Amino acid sequence: MSKRLWFVPLLIAMITNSSLPDASAQARSARERVDLVVLGGAIVTMNPMRQLIEDGGIAINGGRIVAVGSHADIDQKYKGKQTLHATGKTIIPGLINGHTHVPMVLFRGLADDLDLQDWLTKYIFPAEAKNVTEEFVRAGTRLGLAEMIRGGTTTYCDMYYFEDAIADETARAGVRAVLGETVIDFPVADNKTNAEAMAYVERFVKKWQGNELIIPAIAPHAPYTVSEEHLKAARAFSDRTKAPIVTHISETKREVHDSIMAKGTTPIDYLARIGFLNDRVIAAHVVWPTPEELGILKRLGVGVIHNPQSNMKLAAGVAPVPQMLRDGLLLGLGTDGAASNNDLSMWEEMDTAAKLHKVFSGDPKVISAQEALELATIRGAQALHLEKEIGSIEVGKRADLVLVDRSDLNQIPSYNIYSDLVYASKASGVQTVIINGRIIMQDRRLLTLDETAIRAGARVFRERILKSLSNPSSPE
Amino acid sequence: MSKRLWFVPLLIAMITNSSLPDASAQARSARERVDLVVLGGAIVTMNPMRQLIEDGGIAINGGRIVAVGSHADIDQKYKGKQTLHATGKTIIPGLINGHTHVPMVLFRGLADDLDLQDWLTKYIFPAEAKNVTEEFVRAGTRLGLAEMIRGGTTTYCDMYYFEDAIADETARAGVRAVLGETVIDFPVADNKTNAEAMAYVERFVKKWQGNELIIPAIAPHAPYTVSEEHLKAARAFSDRTKAPIVTHISETKREVHDSIMAKGTTPIDYLARIGFLNDRVIAAHVVWPTPEELGILKRLGVGVIHNPQSNMKLAAGVAPVPQMLRDGLLLGLGTDGAASNNDLSMWEEMDTAAKLHKVFSGDPKVISAQEALELATIRGAQALHLEKEIGSIEVGKRADLVLVDRSDLNQIPSYNIYSDLVYASKASGVQTVIINGRIIMQDRRLLTLDETAIRAGARVFRERILKSLSNPSSPE
């Protein structure tokens, strides 16, 4: 025991007076002027070597990371127009919430402890039918964005209605997102027909493509709510525009059963056969894939988003995450909408993911704290097909960074930085958030959103929602 | 849908200008002088009717609740030496952490993602052998107490070594606890033999019995680490002194298997047969009881503590909690030690308990948010055999109260107070904590503990622990 040094992970690599290779190329006698320099703090890079830098520094320019190294080295080589001092903090890549329906925060806690089908068809769909407007979506998005920023989420992937308004609010708040406008075979709040939805998506994608923060996408809801013809049209649209496809697949046993009954095969196999799946698809849930279907997802490069808390709360089931990890699937983590969670904290999602798969498999080694953090950072980036841009602290990547306080009593003492982050840190420990090189939250103060106005907006919609649901003259 | 008023739980009972029956007896024209009055806030009483009072008031005297009613009524009838204004807050009974090993916070994150047996025998037991002293226990207890208070825990049940020092620290901090001194059949930090342990327990129980906050207990570790003779002696001690018995039962499949091999029967049946179980026993974990054993626990009035996060993290298994709820067992909730969790938040424990049993049973209705809160309050009190003293906000009970802020963005909007508390509230939302009528934390400032000193103490022991484990000359 004594010589085994089993606590080695905590001995964070000391890199003193020498920056990482990419950064050393930048070295020069006169300090290079950059937009922002972050000095001090323990950097959890999540780079391919999973390097940890104890007293680090990061130089940021034009929204991207231009150097990562030791505190001393970065300080010597770079002068920031702005400097953030991060001593005593942990610096991690911004967390990636791979699947949500952000405006649904306004339905948080409206209907809980119900079957997924009842929850969806008896409560959520009717509540949406009566309440979802562009104004609702804007108020909900602002509330959800504020909660996500406060919890260190810098990128999220969404599927909802009026996604153009969500894009507008998200870009104003300075948050990165893949935003999928819903395509579904029944009339919804923003579009009443498939033709209307496809026209909306056309305009939406055209408008936002090329934006530094917003990646517009098409979101055919699920194989059981969108016809084969419309799924194929969505794929053709994606082929033409290169827009990602956001969807739900194999969330419940019932969906799989119904697919076999109606289509003669399971959902993923069906989608592969009709030529829907490829490496622009981001599939949420994937709770009930067959082993063959895992092979299909891997072969076609489909991104998969695991939503443990939502799957637990709705009793949808437990996705085969350990197998997905072994198979090297492009796997990320998401909260799902707040109506089935009931929060947007990626910290609880990481913690739950690690614990759920340990107990469900009976093997506590099946997923480690480090792997759980990977799901919320670099692997999450892979699942959104954005791994060249985000998910790690590396030169050339977008500067999406989160400074986490490590002084909360629940984080003391610390022996292993991954354990500390996944099992003991909370959303409330997030101090400062940088997205695309811009400071969005500093010392827990939101810089791009007005919390007072957000609260007031949420109050207004809460009253309207309650009234709409108790009003006997409102449509069924 | 429209007429069904399915959001009724949120329409909190309005009790205006009339207090609850017990309180009305206190009414008089001149205001009665009491120690503390809490005015305003939504009271979640957890009384037998599960009454909710929207704009409530509570009068406290001599450490007990003397009246519960509306804000106006309490204000009219009582004058507090101290007054707490709670408008905008939710007031709940103090949370009850039914099972922990509080000083183990100092091992938080030291060894994770391991099998329970490896974790315990290769890491935790050796680390304890090299580090646990009275001083260690005091530093760990103070750290754990501070974390628990900040998370709204007002009563905890412990099992560790040097429990007299834990009692001393806990009483000083003003926290309520059932504290079980460990009895185990191998030499441990404080006692080397069973005779020493029994003598320690004798002194310990004698010293603390009658204390308003501390309930001293004997804690035979588990049926597989304590002989039949010593278990019987522990029971005899409890019969003589009326001290509770704290123990672990049926935590792993292996324990059950080994019990069948060694004793010819399963652990609970074995303990019942040797006459160990009764209504003073508090059994942690109980992951693998047979249906017959659930009957034994119910018949004998044994308290059971469910530890979902620890059971998940160590892959111990999933306790049959829905069946325990249906059977009406005395069931509470605990965090277990921070080394297998890795925090002491009862908020995450409630959230996880509800979600885990939904997904594991495949039925999202199997445990509701209200039931999860019950496990951490009134049912937890029953499991500790303390339901006459704590667990609800009722006249005559000890004044253990928690004021929870409801303004965090992750709690907005709120439609159902139980959903809000269990699925969306966090330890960080706890504002003010009252134990036995005394304000222990106010507006997140600890009044009985010194956070700076606690941090410094944790740092010292972290260094010692690391040194002890890397020192080749230290004993194996």
Image (cartoon, coloured by chain):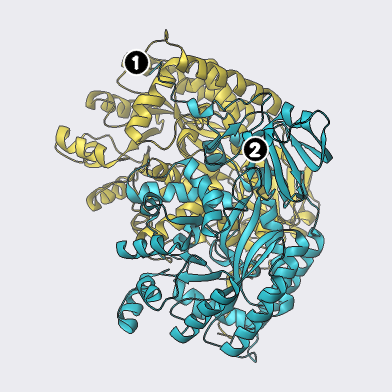
Chain colours: A yellow, B cyan
Count of labels shown? 2
Amino acid type shown at disc 2:
Asp
Q: Name the residue under label 2.
A: B22
Q: Position of residue B307 (x, y in %)?
A: 49, 59
Q: Where is residue A377 in the image (x, y as percent from the top left)?
A: 52, 49
Amino acid type shown at disc 1:
Pro
Residue A62 falls left or right of residue B232: right
Residue B253 falls left or right of residue B82: left
The secondary structure type at the circle numbered 2 is helix
Mark 1 to mark 2 CA distance (whole Å): 55 Å
Callout in the foreground (1, 2): 2
Whether labels 1 and 2 belong to a single chain: the reply is no
Position above or below: B46 against A369: above
Q: Name the residue under label 1.
A: A187
Near mark 2 (Cα within 10 A), the count class, few <14, some 14-19 or many ≥20, is: some
Res B461 quadrant in image: bottom right
Check whether the beta carbons of the residues at disc 1 and disc 2 lie within 8 A of each other.
no
Compare residues A378 and A36 and report the one nearer the observer.
A378
Position above or below: A10 against B82: below
Q: Where is residue B378 in the image (x, y as percent from the top left)?
A: 55, 49
Residue B331 falls left or right of residue A78: left
